[in-house]
């Protein structure tokens, strides 16, 4: 028996006991959760039982950011007790997109804890689970699970930064210092860029500075200079922030859209796109960046503790999600077995 959290309806998470199947599918290994973390996508499902127009058909376990200990390698090249990073994207491996490395564009990819996959696959906010061996990545000994759980969201941030073409010496502005914005700071700094940030909360800007942002602007009090940045990474999900990005980016600069900006009645100043010849590039998930994220974590140069808000056991997943939903957290909220 093992414990699992289950989103049964909007804002309602129950804890249940479940049994693992007797047999493991040939392509999978059996894992025991080390650490998971809550994503903004999880919060959309928590608030609305839906995300980006996709509604859950029935209760599901959330969570797609995690690392785990190998409990049964099932004939694959892993050792018992080995810590692995988990890439949650189960791509087909055979389509044209997969063949060119664009696994995020695979039309039949499956994803845990998501309404986009039918039937739904339970996510990682549970003590034990089976997952495809090819999605599990060996890591160097001594890597902290509380850091390795950042691999998936860090890969997403890296993909946005790569798509925006961030280079050494560039000035970068990150709008929004939620977990993804903070990881966009980490990713841009790793590229050698000079990074500034915006956010509503001074404490969020302080968190960004803890991972090497040069400074920031508290929205409503100060504002970044116009046409000053080579690249702006929009990580807040606010249409107001996208407007700010259009003003802040230099002529012929790039806006990387890391967030999912929801439809709204806020007018977007698209004339600036034309007048300044701004390029706007979206991003979703990642391609080769998962391995790069693991490598950066293994190097131990990033203070992930500075961008960790809190830790909760699986039994308190409801409280963890409530904390995120109430926007009390600055940084990542982690889920642990106990």
Image (spheres, rainbow, N blue to C red):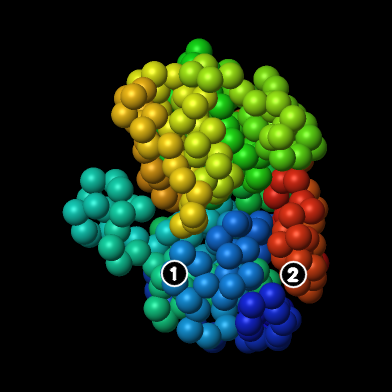
Q: Secondary structure at mark 2?
A: helix
Report how far apart the C-alphas of labels 1 and 2 lie in the structure: 24 Å
As drawn, 111 above or below 220: below
Q: Does 13 sit left or right of 92 as displayed?
A: right
- In front of the other: 113 or 66: 113
Name the residue that disc number 2 marks.
317
Q: Secondary structure at mark 1?
A: loop
Which residue: 58% across, 65% down? 44
Residue 287 x/y as whole percent:
38, 45
Which of discs 1 and 2 lies nearer the camera? The answer is 1
Residue 70 visible in rendering: no
- In front of the other: 149 or 31: 149
Q: Earlier in the sequence, mark 1 or mark 2?
A: 1
Name the residue that disc number 1 marks.
53
Residue 319 visible in rendering: yes
As drawn, 244 above or below 78: above
Which residue: 52% across, 46% down? 239
Which residue: 58% across, 19% down? 225
Residue 338 x/y as whole percent:
80, 67
């Amino acid at each position: 028996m093992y414990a699992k959290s289950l989103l049964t309806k909007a804002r309602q998470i129950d804890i249940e006991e479940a049994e693992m199947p007797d047999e493991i599918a040939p392509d999978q290994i059996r894992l025991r959760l080390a650490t998971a973390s809550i994503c903004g996508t999880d919060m959309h499902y928590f608030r609305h039982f839906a995300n980006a127009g996709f509604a859950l058909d029935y209760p599901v376990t959330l969570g797609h950011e995690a690392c785990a200990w190998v409990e049964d390698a099932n004939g694959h090249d892993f050792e018992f007790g080995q810590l692995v990073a988990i890439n949650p994207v189960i791509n087909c491996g055979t389509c044209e997109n997969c063949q060119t490395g664009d696994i995020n564009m695979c039309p039949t990819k499956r994803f845990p804890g998501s309404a986009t996959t039918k039937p739904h696959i339970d996510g990682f906010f549970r003590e034990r689970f089976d997952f495809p061996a090819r999605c599990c990545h060996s890591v160097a000994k001594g890597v902290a699970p509380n850091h390795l759980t950042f691999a998936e969201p860090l890969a997403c941030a890296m993909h946005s930064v790569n798509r925006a073409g961030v280079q050494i010496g560039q000035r970068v502005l990150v709008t929004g210092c939620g977990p993804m914005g903070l990881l966009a700071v980490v990713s841009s700094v790793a590229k050698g860029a000079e990074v500034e940030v915006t956010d509503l909360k001074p404490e969020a800007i302080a968190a960004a500075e803890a991972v090497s942002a040069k400074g920031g602007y508290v929205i409503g009090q100060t504002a970044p200079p116009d046409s000053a940045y080579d690249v702006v990474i929009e990580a807040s999900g606010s249409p107001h922030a996208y407007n700010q990005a259009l003003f802040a980016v230099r002529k012929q600069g790039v806006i990387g859209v890391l967030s999912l900006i929801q439809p709204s009645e806020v007018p977007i100043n698209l004339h600036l796109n034309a007048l300044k010849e701004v390029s706007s590039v979206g991003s979703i998930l990642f391609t080769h960046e998962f391995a790069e994220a693991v490598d950066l974590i293994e190097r131990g140069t990033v203070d992930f503790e500075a961008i960790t808000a809190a830790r909760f056991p699986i039994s308190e997943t409801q409280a963890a999600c409530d904390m995120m939903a109430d926007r009390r957290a600055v940084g990542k909220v982690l889920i642990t077995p106990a």
